[in-house]
DNA sequence: CATGAATGAGTTTTCATTCAT
DNA sequence: AATGAATGAAAACTCATTCAT
């Protein structure tokens, strides 16, 4: 019986954290942040309350960690080659990959959305932090529309933004939403 | 010497109930239902906790009363001239009145949105009732694009729908959202 | 329209007090003293809370008044000619009149009993007060048994006392209790 | 380093629950169920209010748990040698054991009595259950007097029954009740 | 005499967090 | 790393009592 290596331990830690977060997301989304107790999360994750505090220093930090993960998942698929320039193919790729992500993990994103909208999340400042992280997206999009010859790039971005949010919202909460058809329309009209 | 008349008491009750509800709506929308305590509502309404319970038998009843009031106000403002035909002017009027509504009752809509999405609250039936009452709006829009001779009316409607939802979402949760500018863009591009 | 005379007013006051007490007794007995609220009593008596406080200065005073009335009803039928001597006829009369009283107003006594046993009543000291008022009964009974030639009058009284309490208790809570037969047995064996 | 074992925790839980129940019984019996606050119970048990709720999910459940325990203890102590015949010694033993029971569990009986009589609590079914379980005592007494050749066994039983109830009632609510002396008298006169 | 709006201290209950083991 | 007993501050709610009218 050799003791676990540091690496193994870190691996275990990481997995357990993921597990706790997924359980918590489920419960937060189902009942809301405030109506979900730490006890309940621990019970559903089959661990003790004490251990949960070993992984997350407070209920709020657990929340922030969940929100942050979701942000990162979105950001990462934008400008994949990191050259600072957004080509048409990359924009199409971005739209496709966001929609793909939603399709593959619809329940996660539904929960995530319901979390995002809760005032508790808004109060937690994390949304602002995200806006900073995401600002380069807007900058690159602006440049993209400028290069494409738009007279009013800002409006173009705003409309794209609104449409994407609307799709997000509707797709997640309407089981019969014709996502493939909509995807085509978006690419035709806005890329 | 004489006690207050029944009329006087009814007057007092009505006014105070309205006052409490408006204070509570503000707080619920700002911090969420669970994060707002009865103590806090009472303090903000400058009354005792006891009195609040004299008027609303529980926190949940207070919430339901607020939601119900909100519906009533909105249904009324949506009601068109009922001639069954949506002209271009009427569509502009529609868009304007939806945005107006949001601006006038931002608190309510924020609260509504945060409730809408929480499955636990979803069960309270109030939300369904509202969705039914509001569905006629989308039906009339569909008819409008058909008459206007669009080659792909369904797509036009979908895009407008998505955009409106996106606006809804962003306006409610972004305090710096340039609603007036967006309004203009929407009317230019989608009417 | 002549104003009501002082006498009439007193009459009205007396009747209203009686009414309140009877309503309160009913509720206290049904739900217990603590579980019965002043609001509830007032509602059932069809008066306002304020008016109730006009008649009884506190909830506890109302309780005491009810208890006290019950005591008086019992005491009054003992030694009716007030000569201080208890004859055999008078003892029989006493037993009969207590049982009569129970029969005529079974529901009152049931309620009264259930009130007596509640710890709230015990704490209110009123029971002690009663014991003082009733002590002369024991004195007269002792003299009675002494005169009758009992070797152990104290034990005779105790047994009579226990039996009477037992009858009281059983008759009130057992609808098929053969009260007439028991009455005969008691008079045969203990008078 | 290691957490408490499951066994240790169960031990702690069991002991603490017993402790809380015994403190609560004392207070309920002394001041009544409603007049005893959870705060007060916790203070007397030297624990926090929160911990009490860790062990009993509500005040009412705590009450029910106490009543239920009381029944169990008593049923056991009542159980005779089950030969179906009640000798004179056994009757004396009976009377003694009933009185013993009262003396040992005065708090419980007082609480039980105060509940027994309140119709609201009556509904909780626990009380009925007990009455059924205890009824065999009276059946065996009846048989005893029949065998003893009494001319009017029914009356003998009734009088004993009344006396026992009277004792019960008086002993529980009169702190100076001379129980030992009464016990002697009963055995002399009724066995 | 009569009302019920209004109060505030007290009640039951919940829950994030800590800590001995 | 792991447990859950224990805490205490705060929540929702109740109710005897007061008082302006």
Image (cartoon, coloured by chain):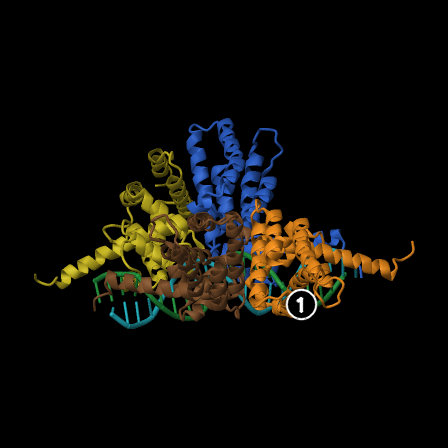
Chain colours: A yellow, B blue, C orange, D brown, E cyan, F green
Farthest residue in the left direction? A1
Q: Nearer the viewer, residue D30 or B3?
A: D30
Question: Residue B24: horizontal and vertical position, in percent?
Answer: 56, 56
* Residue C131 visible in the shown view: yes
Residue E2 or B128: which is nearer the viewer?
E2
User: Measured along the vertical axis of the image, is residue E18 above or below residue D186?
Assistant: below
**Side (left or right) of C85 relative to A185:** right
Q: Residue under mark 1: which chain is it in?
A: C
Residue B48, by quadrant, is: bottom right
For the residue labelled by badge 1, is the local secondary structure a helix, a strand or a loop? helix
Residue on which disc 1 sits: C140
> In x, y percent, where is residue B72?
59, 42
Up the image or down, D126 lies above or below A104; here it is below
Q: Is residue A70 visible?
A: no
The residue located at (49%, 67%) in the rendering is D179
Q: Nearer the viewer, residue B138 or F13?
A: F13
Rendered-image quadrant of the C terminus of chain C: bottom right
Q: Quadrant of residue C79?
A: bottom right
Residue visible at 58% across and 54% down? C167
Question: How many labels sit on residues?
Answer: 1
Q: Which residue is located at x 50 percent, y 36 percent?
A: B191
**Which percent across, then down, holds residue A137?**
33, 52
Point out residue D108 in the picture as x, y percentages from the top left corner. Answer: 45, 61
Is E6 in front, or is C161? C161
Q: Residue at x 42, y 63 (%)?
A: D100
In the drawing, does residue D75 fall left or right of residue A19?
Answer: right
Tell me the crowding category of disc 1: few under 14, some 14 to 19, or many 20 or more residues within 10 angstroms, Cα based: some
């Amino acid at each position: 019986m050799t003791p676990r290596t540091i690496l193994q331990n870190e691996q275990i830690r990481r997995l357990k954290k993921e597990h706790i977060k997924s359980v918590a997301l489920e419960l937060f989304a189902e009942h809301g942040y405030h109506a979900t107790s730490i006890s309940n999360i621990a019970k559903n994750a089959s661990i003790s309350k004490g251990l949960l505090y070993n992984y997350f220093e407070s209920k709020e930090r657990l929340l922030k960690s969940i929100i942050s993960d979701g942000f990162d998942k979105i950001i990462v698929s934008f400008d994949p080659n990191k050259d600072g320039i957004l080509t048409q193919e990359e924009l199409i790729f971005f739209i496709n990959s966001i929609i793909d992500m939603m399709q593959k993990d619809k329940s996660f994103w539904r929960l995530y959305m319901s979390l995002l909208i809760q005032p508790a999340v808004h109060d937690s400042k994390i949304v602002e932090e995200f806006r900073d992280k995401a600002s380069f997206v807007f900058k690159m999009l602006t440049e993209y529309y400028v290069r494409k010859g738009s007279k009013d790039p800002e409006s173009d971005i705003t409309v794209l933004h609104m449409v994407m949010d609307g799709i997000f919202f509707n797709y997640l909460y309407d089981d019969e939403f014709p996502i493939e058809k909509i995807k085509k329309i978006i690419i035709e009209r806005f890329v």
